[in-house]
Image: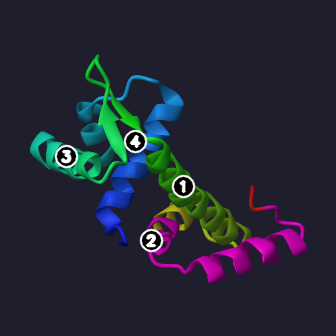
C-alpha cells in the first residue's frame, strides 16, 4: 500500500531529527514541521499502526527497520532533487521546496534516471 505524502513527511522529519539526536519526541516533530501536538499524535499513531515507528521505554519516537528504510528512501529523493535543482541554477530555498513537493510523486524509474544522469555528467547525487 502506498503511503500518503503527509506520512512520508513525518517519517522524513523523524529521520532527520534522529540524525541530530537519538531522543526524538513528538514535540520535536511538531516544532520542526509547524504542526500541533494533536496532529503529530495522530500521525505517530498511524505510523505505529503501520509498523514504521515505535515509542521506546523513555517515550522517544524510534523508526523501525522498515520505517528507517522508507525514511532514507524519501530523504535521498529530497537531497538528490535539491542538488539537481541547485545545479540547474535554482536558489537553495526554492530548490529544497520544489524537491519536497516532487519527492513524493516521482517514480523510481525517473528518480534512478536522474541519479544516473547526475553521475554521468559529474554532478554526483550523493
Disc 1 from disc 4: Cα separation? 11 Å
Was residue 121 drawn as part of the magenta stretch in this picture?
yes
- Where 4 sits versus 44, above or below? below
Mark 3: which secondary structure? helix
According to the picture, the residue beneath numbered tag 3 turns out to be: 45
Left or right of 41 in this view: 114? right
Q: Which label lies toward us, 3 or 2?
A: 3
- Mark 3 to mark 1 CA distance (whole Å): 21 Å
Disc 1 residue crowd, few under 14, some 14–19, many 20+, Cα 10 Å = many
Task: Reply above or below: 20 against 32.
Answer: above
Mark with earlier residue (3, 4)? 4
Q: Please report whichever mark, 3 or 1, sits nearer to the chain's N-terminal start.
A: 3
Q: Position of residue 46 (x, y in %)?
A: 22, 52
Report if residue 120 is visible in the image. Answer: yes
Residue picked out by circle 1: 75
Mark sitting earlier along the chain (3/2): 3
Left/right of residue 83 with respect to residue 63 in the rendered view: right
The label number, if any, that marks residue 104 in the structure image = 2
Looking at the picture, tell me which residue is in the foreground, 98 or 65.
65
- Determine which of the numbered discs, if any, sits on residue 14 in the image: 4
Q: Which residues are magenta?
A: 98-124
- Placement of the N terminus among the 4 image quadrants: bottom left
Which x, y percent locates residue 8? 38, 59
Which mark lies nearer to you, 3 or 1? Answer: 3
Determine if the magenta segment contains residue 73: no
Amino acid at each position: 500500500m502506498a503511503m500518503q505524502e503527509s506520512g512520508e513527511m513525518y517519517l522524513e522529519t523523524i529521520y532527520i531529527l534522529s540524525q541530530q539526536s537519538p531522543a526524538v519526541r513528538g514535540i520535536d516533530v511538531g516544532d520542526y514541521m509547524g504542526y500541533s501536538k494533536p496532529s503529530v499524535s495522530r500521525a505517530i499513531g498511524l505510523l505505529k499502526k503501520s509498523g514504521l515507528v515505535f515509542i521506546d521505554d523513555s517515550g522517544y519516537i524510534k523508526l523501525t527497520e522498515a520505517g528507517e528504510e522508507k525514511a532514507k528512501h524519501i530523504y535521498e529523493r529530497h537531497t538528490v532533487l535539491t542538488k539537481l535543482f541547485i545545479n540547474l541554477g535554482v536558489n537553495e530555498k526554492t530548490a529544497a521546496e520544489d524537491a519536497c513537493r516532487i519527492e513524493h510523486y516521482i517514480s523510481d524509474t525517473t528518480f534512478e534516471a536522474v541519479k544516473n544522469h547526475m553521475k554521468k555528467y559529474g554532478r554526483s547525487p550523493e
